[in-house]
Image: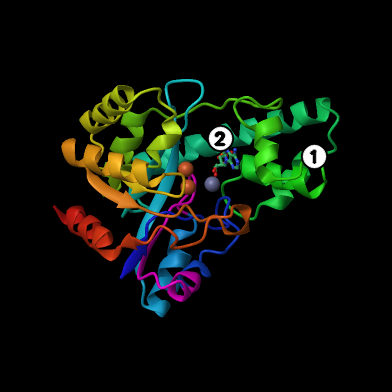
Amino acid sequence: MFCDLHMHSTASDGTDSPEMLPQLAKAAGVNAIALTDHDTTSGLDACAGACGECEIDFVPGIELSIDPGRPMGTLHLLGYFVRQDSEALNGIIKALHESRTSRNPRIVKRLQELGIDITEEEVLGHADGATIGRPHIASILHEKGYVKTIKEAFTRYLGASGAAYTRRDKIQPEDAIAAVHDAGGLAVLAHPVQLRLPSEDAIEQKIASLRDMGLDGVEVMHSDHTPTDVKYFTKLAERLNLMATGGSDYHGTRKTVKLGSQNVPYSIYERLEGARDS
Ligand code: AMP
Ligand code: ZN
Ligand code: FE
Ligand code: FE
């Protein structure tokens, strides 16, 4: 039996609806899923209902964009088994939403200055979910032929070294971890390789400091992780007394990653489920 504890729907930058994901999971032989849309819980109720119909176990989740503390890396925090009535978590979701609402127009303006034909209305029209971000802009650049791939859109324009890169205010890790806990959830560091830290010492220090803030687990299996990474982070999680989790980070057609592709054992879901009560 398998689970997949990391995926996105049209509520953020995935291309499948929250109702559709459980059917796709069932077809892929996955028995438990977590929906972890960027900075929103708006898809959770619909996905929970569809999981019930498919007889698949459901983890209501979220993936929060956190200040990585250095210019290049990415720090994403997964919240698992979060309730939607937490004032602290809803406050963070609101702050993240506002930071996006102010950033997207700045990116569009910069692209226009670079001679690209794109408008804010187009970007809004391209997303039907709550969380609109760079992947939606990347899709427009791709469809209009400015870039050959989504990846090229990030390299040339939208990524940290791109010509239209625009920072946005980010949430501090201690606040995000506390908010996930306030919502009754477990806080897990997503895809630690994306922190882009220079050494194993730096990685261990960073994860230990997050654990001291209350982090509960580390995502050890992920599409960006090599088999060596998986072994390394599994050991590190053990040493730091953190839970190990895993997921594909499926985004539908926006990325090549397949739902269920990490073959995460169902026992990882069971352990997470068990930890939530204690
Ligand atoms: P945003 O939420 O607007 O900051 O955009 C983050 C999203 O962009 C995440 O889903 C990333 O997976 C995606 N992303 C970041 N860098 C790249 C890249 N080089 N190629 C493709 N997708 C990327
Ligand atoms: Zn995404
Ligand atoms: Fe992520
Ligand atoms: Fe993700």
Task: Report the amino acid beneath label 2.
Answer: Glu
Residue at 59% over, 27% down:
160
| Residue nearest the viewer, comparing 119 with 249 | 249
Look at the image and name its color scheme: rainbow
| Crowd band around label 1 with a 10 angstrom C-alpha radius: few (<14), some (14–19), many (20+) | some
Name the residue tied to disc 2.
Answer: 98
Taking the image as shown, residue 161 lies to the left or right of residue 81, namely right
Q: Nearer the viewer, mark 2 or mark 1?
A: 1
Residue at 51% over, 60% down:
258
Q: Earlier in the sequence, mark 2 or mark 1?
A: 2
Task: Report the amino acid beneath label 1.
Answer: Thr
Residue at 26% over, 37% down:
215
Range of magenta residues:
23-41
Name the residue tied to disc 1.
Answer: 119
Quadrant the N terminus occupies: bottom left
In which image quadrant can residue 32 be found? bottom left
